[in-house]
């Protein structure tokens, strides 16, 4: 079914001239912010937009195309990135009508008054969907691009976000190589598309992760853009690196170059540093988060632009992750603490995304207390003030996992008394986590559980623990 199009010719002419002027204009180096919404305590859109502006963000990235937010963004000067959810990529890849419909429903009602400029087809699709979906990604991107063209929308760049795990090798940067299972069948057609449409390779870059998993060998200052004397020289190119971020970005650049696309621009779709985390997580604190993000802003807003060693002088457009701490994100504690703001809207630390506030005007930061790994025992217990019905459900779940997880809380066994839900659940959470942590399990249970260094054992009842 063809879409009826009824635009007056004048509209096309205006769009034509606008797109001419835009394509020749420099785009802004001022970072934007990722407006994730996986929290049950976040302010409504209008309030959130005020907060985004108070950070002096230039752009905002959504993980969907929330109509309320897109409506609120009308007539603001914030550039907007929206997203096609991963779940419909497969269907869109094989159905132009569906693609057209998606654009008609999610873009057309708000464009051009909302400055939608980027449309990401999926979020870290390679990292978070089944391999069957991967070959459908680029066909879906092509269909979305075609729909935009059909509807006369020319200012929107189509892309998709990738995490560093699209690489099989990233060290030294000049050895950067896409994974063998996706290089030819996903990355090559994707880069062909991005190059042809003059779009960007949208990359999520978190120096926090490689640093935190190897903090003895990687210098923290090098990860925080603070290194004065630590540099890494790439023996393949002789390029000298002063921070981990540049190293990661250039690894992707060299991977693109390796398969023949040296000119596709990189757009930092996400970067950031957690302001808090679990006891067993290192270096997640306000001091490091402020240092990383402030230095990142300083780097990307420098004039003239600094780029990276492999692309000196290039502008690196970006979005910082994230606007808010999001209390409903699963996984380890850091996942829920990447925000520049608390859900109540107050800043976790002072930051000005325009880069115009000198560091000396910021208040002193709290000293970091967890820049070295925690050594000792940790237990996983029921968090304060949580829903008891939900705890009962989690208790049943924890007891169904692992081996003999809840034997000790059965009637007559040594941890049965005191016979209370919270006591039994705390035992079950500790027992579950002690067994399953090596396989990647976290102490979270949808927010019902929390880590503690205070041994909850009582009398002859010994709670299992994780020992670091
Ligand atoms: C995709 O299409 C199939 C077949 O038309 C349909 O059954 C399914 O519900 C669709 N999936 C989504 C996520 O829309
Ligand atoms: C394509 O999508 C349209 C709109 O959702 C739907 O009506 C149609 O059945 C789909 N076609 C196929 C072949 O699934
Ligand atoms: C370069 O990458 C390959 C895999 O692509 C890897 O096997 C090799 O160890 C890397 N070289 C260095 C020096 O790390
Ligand atoms: C990338 O695009 C440029 C400019 O449009 C073109 O000259 C070049 O051939 C393209 N590269 C590849 C590998 O397709
Ligand atoms: C870098 O300088 C710091 C502070 O002066 C020092 O503690 C550290 O050992 C130096 N590191 C290297 C690799 O020289
Ligand atoms: C906002 O929340 C943070 C963290 O819970 C708290 O420290 C701060 O005092 C709150 N600010 C206001 C204005 O309520
Ligand atoms: C408590 O949790 C149960 C089960 O998950 C849920 O049905 C109920 O709505 C929750 N109660 C409150 C007050 O949130
Ligand atoms: C449970 O026991 C089985 C058999 O002894 C073993 O293969 C499995 O790894 C154990 N599971 C855990 C979580 O320890």
Image (cartoon, rainbow, N blue to C red):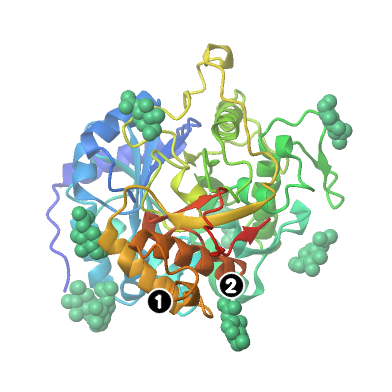
Disc marking residue 332: none
Q: Where does the image place residue 245, in percent across and percent down from the top left?
A: 65, 43
Q: Earlier in the sequence, mark 1 or mark 2?
A: 2
Q: Where does the image place residue 311, in percent across and percent down from the top left?
A: 68, 41
Q: Is residue 204 left or right of residue 93?
A: right
Crowding at label 2, few (<14), some or many (≥20) Cα neighbours within 10 Å?
Answer: some
Q: Where does the image place residue 300, in percent across and percent down from the top left?
A: 57, 32
Q: Secondary structure at mark 1?
A: loop
> Which residue is at 55% across, 14% downward?
358
Q: Nearer the viewer, residue 410 or 141?
A: 410
Q: Image quadrant for the N terminus?
A: bottom left
Q: Image quadrant for the C terminus?
A: bottom right
Crowding at label 1, few (<14), some or many (≥20) Cα neighbours within 10 Å?
Answer: few
- Image label count: 2
Is residue 162 among what the camera can see? no
Q: Where does the image place residue 197, in percent across and percent down from the top left?
A: 46, 55
Disc marking residue 182: 2
Q: Quadrant of ligand 6?
A: top left
Q: Nearer the viewer, residue 379 or 58?
A: 379
Does the closest atom of ligand 3 sit within 8 Å of the Cβ of label 2?
Answer: no
Disc marking residue 411: 1
Q: Is residue 365 left or right of residue 104?
A: right
């Amino acid at each position: 079914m063809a879409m009826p199009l009824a635009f007056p010719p004048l509209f096309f002419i205006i769009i034509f001239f606008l797109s001419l002027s835009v394509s020749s204009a420099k785009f802004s180096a001022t970072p934007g912010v990722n407006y994730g919404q996986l929290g049950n305590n976040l302010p409504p859109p209008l309030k959130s937009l005020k907060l985004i502006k108070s950070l002096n963000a230039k752009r905002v990235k959504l993980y969907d195309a929330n109509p309320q937010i897109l409506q609120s963004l009308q007539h603001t000067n914030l550039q907007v990135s929206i997203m096609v959810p991963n779940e419909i990529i497969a269907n869109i890849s094989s159905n132009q009508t569906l693609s057209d419909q998606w654009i008609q429903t999610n873009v057309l009602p708000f464009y051009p008054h909302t400055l939608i400029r980027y449309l990401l087809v999926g979020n870290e699709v390679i990292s978070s969907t089944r391999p069957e979906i991967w070959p459908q990604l680029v066909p879906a991107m092509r269909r979305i691009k075609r729909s935009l063209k059909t509807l006369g929308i020319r200012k929107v760049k189509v892309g998709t976000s990738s995490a560093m795990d699209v690489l099989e090798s990233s060290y030294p940067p000049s050895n950067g190589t896409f994974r063998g299972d996706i290089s030819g069948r996903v990355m090559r057609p994707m880069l062909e598309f991005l190059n042809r449409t003059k779009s960007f390779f949208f990359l999520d870059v978190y120096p926090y992760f490689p640093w935190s998993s190897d903090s003895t060998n990687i210098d923290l200052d090098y990860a925080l853009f603070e290194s004065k004397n630590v540099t890494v020289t790439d023996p393949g190119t002789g390029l000298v690196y002063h921070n981990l971020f540049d190293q990661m970005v250039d690894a992707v650049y060299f991977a693109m170059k390796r398969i023949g696309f040296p000119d596709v621009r990189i757009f930092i779709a996400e970067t950031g540093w957690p302001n808090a985390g679990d006891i067993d997580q290192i270096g997640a604190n306000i001091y490091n988060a402020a240092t990383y993000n402030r230095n990142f802003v300083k780097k990307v807003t420098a004039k003239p632009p600094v780029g990276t060693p492999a692309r000196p002088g290039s502008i690196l457009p970006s979005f910082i992750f994230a606007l808010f701490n999001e209390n409903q994100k699963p996984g380890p504690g850091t996942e829920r603490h990447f925000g520049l703001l608390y859900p109540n809207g107050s800043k976790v630390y002072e930051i000005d995304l325009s880069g115009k506030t000198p560091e000396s005007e910021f208040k002193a930061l709290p000293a970091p207390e967890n820049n070295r790994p925690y050594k000792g025992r940790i237990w996983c217990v029921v968090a304060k003030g949580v829903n008891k019905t939900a705890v009962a459900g989690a208790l049943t779940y924890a007891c169904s996992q692992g081996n003999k997880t809840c034997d000790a809380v059965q009637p007559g066994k040594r941890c049965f008394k005191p016979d209370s839900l919270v006591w039994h659940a705390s035992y079950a959470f500790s027992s579950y986590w002690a067994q399953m942590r090596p396989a990647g399990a976290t102490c979270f249970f949808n927010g019902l559980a929390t880590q503690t260094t205070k041994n909850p054992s009582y009398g002859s009842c010994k709670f299992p623990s994780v020992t670091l």
